[in-house]
Image: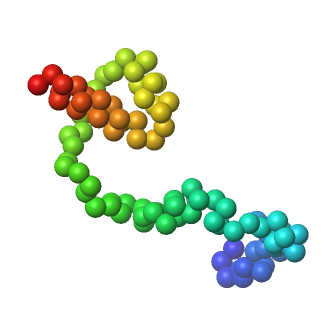
Amino acid sequence: MPGESLDDFEKRVGDDIPEATDADFARARPISDFPDLLEALNNARARGQRGAQKSEVKDRIGLRLDHTIVEHFRATGPGWQSRINDVLAEHIKKHS
């Protein structure tokens, strides 16, 4: 409601986040226990911010591949499209 204070809003709607208790703090662990999260936070960029170009520019294309090929590479995790590129680049080296 216009002009309503945060306290009034919380009284009317309720707290979204309960206040932390001593028991919560006793269970707390340092962020160093979560190296993947720490790395993600350290490498986070602002929305829309692009990092430095790391390699030569690639062309964006539409490519139709067999379902089994796509699933095989997707199952290998993030970076699967780059791995397809690497396999194709290796094929060109061998057959040029």
Q: Residue at x 11, y 25 (%)?
A: 96
**Where's residue 57, x and y in %?**
20, 48
Residue 7 falls in image quadrant? bottom right
Residue 50 falls in image quadrant? bottom left
- Nearer the observer, 56 or 46: 56
Q: Residue furthest left?
A: 96
Task: Establish if 46 lies above or below 87.
Answer: below
- Nearer the observer, 12 or 96: 96
Residue 61 falls in image quadrant? top left
Task: Establish if 77 lies above or below 91.
Answer: below
- Nearer the observer, 63 or 16: 63
Q: Residue at x 72, y 79 (%)?
A: 6
**Where's residue 68, x and y in %?**
43, 18
Q: Residue at x 63, y 66 (%)?
A: 32
**Where's residue 69, x and y in %?**
39, 21
Quarter in which the N terminus is drawn? bottom right
Q: Is residue 44 left or right of residue 96?
A: right
Q: How many marks?
A: 0
- Work out whether residue 12 can be spotted: no
Task: Establish if 54 lies above or below 49.
Answer: above
- Work out whether residue 75 can be spotted: yes
Q: Is residue 33 left or right of residue 75?
A: right
Q: Is residue 37 left or right of residue 26?
A: left
Q: Residue at x 42, y 18 (%)?
A: 67
Task: Establish if 61 lies above or below 1.
Answer: above
Give the color scheme: rainbow, by chain, secondary structure or one colour: rainbow
